[in-house]
Every structure is written in C-alpha cells, then in structure tokens.
C-alpha cells in the first residue's frame, strides 16, 4: 500500500474556537465544522508527514482504536475533506504553500 | 467644473462618503430623497460612482446578483443594472434605469467589498441604539427583525430594520445607521454607537435571553453576514472578522413574545 500525504489547502479560512475547528471555503463560503478526528488530521496535515504516521502518533494515541482500521477511516476522511477542497492529498509529499498574497480588492 | 461634477451628490453611510455623479436631474432628486439623512454636504468623497441612466446592457439577465473580480476590476451585474468598481482608483460606473433599487444594491455591494478589507461587514439584522449602546437583532426573514423594530420604545434610535453596518473600531465594533430598509420601509437614523450585544431572534412564548457558546455564536453570525462576492481573499477576511466580533461582542438568543415588553430586557 502506497503512502498518502495530506496538506491543508491554503485557499480556505480556518479558525479554532472553543475547541471546534471551523473552516470556510473561500470559493463558495460553505462553512464546515470539523469533528475531533478531522481536527487532528487538519492540524497535522503538513504535507510531509505520511498519513500512516499521523494516525499512529496522533489519532491512535488520542482514541483507543486499532491502527489498521484507524488508518482506513483516516484515509476515507482525508479523501472526503479533499473532496470539499479542505485538504490536499497526494502519494508524494506536498510542498506547503502560503496563503495567496493579498491585493487591493 | 464639468456637468457630471455639478450633478453629484455625496451619500455617506458608515463613515464612507460616496459621490454619485449623474447627468440626469430627476435621478439626482430621486437620490436626494431616497438617501435623505445620509446626504453629505462636504466636498470630500472616498469613492466616486458615475451613473449612466439607460437600460442596462446585461447578457443573460438574472435575479441573483453576480459579482466577479478580474484584472483589478469588479463587475457587478443583475437583471436591472450593470456596474464596475475599481478599488485601487476608488471609482465605479453604473448603468441602470432611473430607479432607487438598482443604486441601492450597488451601494450595498461596494460597501460590503470595501468593508471586508477594513474588518467590517454588513449583517442581515435590525439594529438600534439605546442608552448610548447599539444592539443588533439578527435573523432570517420572519425571524422578527421588523417586529422588534416596530416595538422599539421612543428612546431607542433605529439604525435599520434590515441590514446593519458593522465596523471594527478600537477594541470593539461599532454599528452605523443605514438607509437600507426592509419591510418597515423606514430609513435608519444616521448615527452610530459601540455594539453592546448581538441577539439572534426567535419568537416564543416568553421573553428570555440565553447566551450562546462562542462556536454556536460564530456559526450564527456567519450565517447572517451579507457577502456577495465569490472571492477567496475577501471571504477569508470576512470569516476572520466574524471571529473577532464573537471574541469581543456577546452573542445571545433573544426569544420573545411579540409585544413591547421585550424591550425591558434590552439596554
């Protein structure tokens, strides 16, 4: 099984409030509230750490879950978040981009 | 001085003076009547808008406004107007027939675009000042914005019954009066005050106020922000302004019986 890398999409807006991570699509203003697992995934999605390692070090230590099923769930979640343009996923490391530079709109 | 300059009127909403230029005297009078209370007699304007009175040349006319940014220029379009706005030059152009609704929509959109960069936003809410403090009453249609506005006591100064003008200032946020009206069709007073509380309206069998947790407050606030452009940078700016607002202004649910006793809880 090939490795999967995840990175935060720099084109969304994200803030944590009261322990809840909220993300808004810059394209259509859709608001997402992430659950605890998705929040861990989002916060760990640096584009360089394989998903398997995030699951092992961050998710399995937080929840009492069996690593292989946790990885399958995390992969499913990562693909779902990528479908909403919240995360980027790739089988190779993803260079982290800065948010788009501002102009005088 | 050109003909266009002589027929200009400055409309100042939210501390932002906008000069609207027209060559049509009837339209000028219409503007002066429509924005009575917001017409500024000074010479200074932050923004210049030239209005061409003509049937708008709109491809694929639609009820919903379309706001697009391309090559330094915003294009605003609806079935009844076509407009362009150049934020760097702070100039715009509107093509519309002689009616108050089209210019009203264009002004709302331009204010929302400019405000987004300045830490503010337009909110779908009524607002009023009482005892020197502003209170906002947000909610979708039928939530009670018109009702709460109509029930306001004589000492409350109505800022708007439909669209509140919110701007970050110092450590807090300030609400300004707007001429943007809803069902009440009453232009708000051109005054401002620091915002003391945002209420989310709900009609019920008793009058009560329940403070919302920050996350719920943020979701509710964002659901009521009026923003017309599908633009990543400005959407991000408004998103972060909403979080700043919730961190500085209490947000509560105001459940109320539709009679004037509800105002005993406010102010």
Image (cartoon, coloured by chain):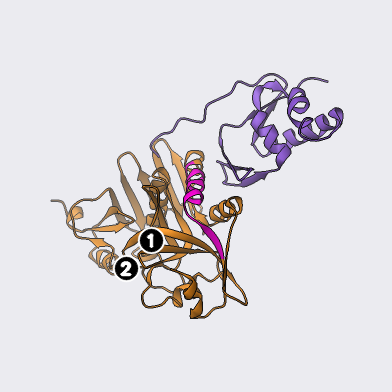
Question: Which secondary structure lies at badge 2?
Answer: helix
Residue A33, percent across and down? 65, 45
Residue found 71% across the figure and 37% down from its top: A38
Helix, strand or loop: magenta stretch: helix
Residue found 84% across the figure and 34% down from its top: A65
Q: Residue at label 2?
A: B34
Residue B96, percent across and down? 37, 58
Residue found 31% across the figure and 63% down from its top: B191
Chain B drawing hue? orange
Residue B30, percent across and down? 29, 68
Kindly identify which chain the residue marked by label 1 belongs to.
B
On the image, which quarter does residue A81 sit in?
A: top right
Question: Which secondary structure lies at badge 1?
Answer: helix
Residues in magenta? B237-253
In the rendered structure, the answer to whether residue B199 lies left or right of residue B188 reads right
Q: CA distance from mark 2 to mark 1?
A: 9 Å
Residue B255, percent across and down? 58, 70
User: Looking at the image, do the residues carrying marks 2 and 1 touch, with CB atoms under 8 Å apart?
Assistant: yes
The label shown at residue B104 is: 1
Both on one chain, marks 2 and 1?
yes
């Amino acid at each position: 099984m090939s490795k999967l890398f995840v990175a935060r999409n720099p084109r969304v807006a994200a803030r944590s409030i009261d322990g809840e991570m909220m993300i808004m699509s810059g394209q259509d203003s859709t608001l997402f509230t992430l659950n605890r697992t998705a929040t861990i995934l989002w916060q760990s999605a640096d584009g360089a750490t394989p998903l398997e390692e995030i699951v092992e070090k961050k998710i399995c230590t937080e929840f009492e879950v069996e690593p292989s099923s946790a990885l399958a769930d995390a992969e499913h979640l990562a693909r779902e978040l990528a479908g909403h343009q919240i995360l980027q996923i790739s089988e190779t490391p993803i260079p982290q981009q800065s948010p788009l530079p501002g102009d005088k709109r | 001085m050109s003909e266009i300059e002589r027929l200009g009127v400055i409309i100042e909403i939210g501390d932002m003076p906008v000069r609207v230029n027209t060559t049509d005297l009837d339209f000028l009078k219409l503007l002066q009547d429509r924005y009575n209370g917001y017409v500024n007699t000074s010479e200074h304007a932050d923004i210049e808008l030239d209005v061409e009175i003509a049937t708008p040349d709109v491809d694929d006319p639609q009820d919903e406004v379309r706001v697009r940014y391309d090559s330094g220029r915003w294009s605003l379009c609806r079935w009844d107007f076509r407009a362009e706005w150049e934020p760097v030059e702070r100039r715009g152009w509107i093509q519309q027939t002689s009616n108050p609704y089209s210019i009203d929509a264009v002004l709302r959109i331009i204010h929302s675009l400019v405000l987004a960069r300045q830490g503010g936003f337009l909110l779908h809410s009524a607002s009023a000042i009482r005892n020197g403090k502003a209170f906002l009453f947000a909610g979708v249609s039928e939530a009670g914005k018109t009702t709460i506005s109509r029930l306001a006591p004589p000492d409350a100064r109505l800022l708007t019954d439909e669209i509140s003008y919110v701007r970050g200032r110092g450590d807090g946020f300030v609400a300004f009066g707007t001429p943007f009206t809803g069902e009440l069709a009453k232009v708000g007073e051109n005054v401002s005050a620091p915002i003391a509380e945002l209420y989310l309206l709900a009609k019920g069998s008793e009058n009560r106020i329940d403070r919302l947790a920050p996350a719920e407050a943020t979701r509710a606030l964002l659901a009521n922000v009026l923003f017309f452009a599908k633009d990543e940078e400005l959407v991000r700016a408004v998103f972060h302004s909403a979080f700043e607002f919730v961190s500085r202004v209490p947000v509560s649910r105001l459940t109320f019986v539709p009679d004037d006793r509800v105002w005993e809880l406010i102010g």
